[in-house]
Image: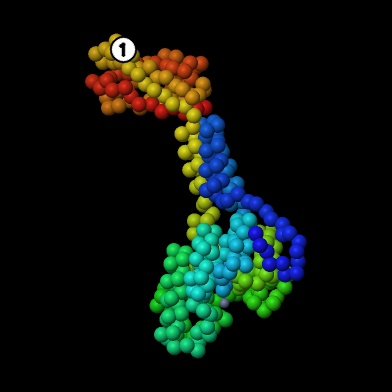
Amino acid sequence: MTYYSGGNNTVPSASCTAAGGNTGGNTGGNTGGNTGGNTGGNTGGNTGGNTGGSTQNCSAGYVGLTFDDGPNSGTTNQIISALKAANATATVFPTGQNAQNNASLMQAYKNAGLQIGNHSWDHPHLVNMSQSDVQSQLSRTQQAIQNTAGVTPTVFRPPYGEVNGTVNSVASGLGLRVVTWDVDSNDWNNASSSSIRSAAQRLTNGQTMLMHDWPAATVQALPGILQDLQSRNLCTGHISASTGRAVAPAGGSTGGNTGGNTGGNTGGSTGSCTVTGTAVAGESWGDRFNVTYTVSGASNWSVSVNPGSGQSVQSSWNATRSGNTFTSAGNNSFGVTFYSGGNNTVPSATCTAR
Ligand SMILES: [Zn+2]
């Protein structure tokens, strides 16, 4: 990739992180499942899910990191990488003009799970404009964001934080909550990366901080900010359109567990053996019949048979029986005598590796 050097030609360090909950869960689940059936699947799934999902402690609450004026080819991808590396999220407030000119970076915002808000079309002083011009600034931006990222913003950050009655009523007519900030990083005013990082140390539960998607110092400060928040048990959230405060991102914290359980169960049950039932020729009598079940793919297995309407298990051989479940006793086939109840269809069965 190409870096702007800012006079510093040291090769930037980089870190790599697996993606979040779903990936962790499914990978763990499928690996566990294929190796060891249900037990392996569930264990692998849960471990993978929990590890991949949320290892963060959010006991101190959520804060909102916000990045205005993007997307920009020089900084957007770096901000996204830093957030991803820390399993963090943020709210971005692109202008409509930048959104329209950088559709793929808008997609990158969206794919990174960031909340996308409205920041006007081209960053004017809205308080000096007529109602119809304000309307045009905000609605064209809604449309550009919808066209490029496929989402409709519910929060609006006025340029320069300037609001009046007209701005408020236009925003509210478009379903937008006006949000400013609690902490100003002053990154727009040439603040150093260490001073931006210090500003973030003032954030408390529910608060938001103003930053921008263009200053190099912001990109430089971000990993440290995320590290500091984590050490204070604060997680990054999204801005609630109903309260204007930072809250847990929708669906975020359950990702790991859901991914784990789903991956585990899926991996487990599709695991590693199959069973086929065949009626034994000549062994069907008035009220009962014999079936041989043959297992392949595993030597240590458990098979559940599913007697049909009127049917029930009378007895079995070559396997250990518990109800309608049979476990291997050193053979890869076993037999079952079913009471037919007038129904001679061979009952289906499912196999699980143990
Ligand atoms: Zn701005």
Left or right of 103, for residue 210: right
Instruction: Give the x, y percent position of residue 130.
Output: 44, 88
Q: At 52% from the left edge and 51% from the top edge, which residue is drawn?
A: 255
Give the colouring mode of the picture. Answer: rainbow
Image x and y of residue 106, in percent:
51, 65
Q: Is residue 70 visible?
A: yes
Residue occupying image coordinates x 56% and y 46%:
24
Q: Which of the 4 image quarters holds residue 187?
A: bottom right
In depth, the one of 347 and 15 nearer the eye is 15
Q: Is residue 227 above or below residue 336?
A: below
Residue extending farthest to the top is 282
User: Mark 1 vs ligand 1: CB under 8 Å?
Assistant: no
Residue 25 % position (x, y): 54, 44
Q: On the image, numbered disc 1 is attached to which residue? A: 281
Q: Is residue 204 visible?
A: no
Residue 55's place in the image compared with 162, above or below, is above
Indicate the secondary structure of the residue bearing disc 1. Answer: strand
View quadrant of ligand 1: bottom right
Residue nearest the viewer, comparing 210 with 321: 210
| Residue that appears at 52% across and 72% down | 98
Where residue 198 appears, as percent x and y from the top left, is 71, 70
Check disc 1: other Cα within 10 Å, few if <14, some if 14-19, many if 20+.
few
Residue ranking furthest to the front: 2
Question: Which amino acid, mark 1?
Answer: Ala
Residue at 53%, 80% in the rendered image:
123
Q: Is residue 231 above or below residue 184?
A: above
Q: Quadrant of the N terminus?
A: bottom right
Q: How many marks?
A: 1
* Left or right: residue 3 compared with residue 249: right
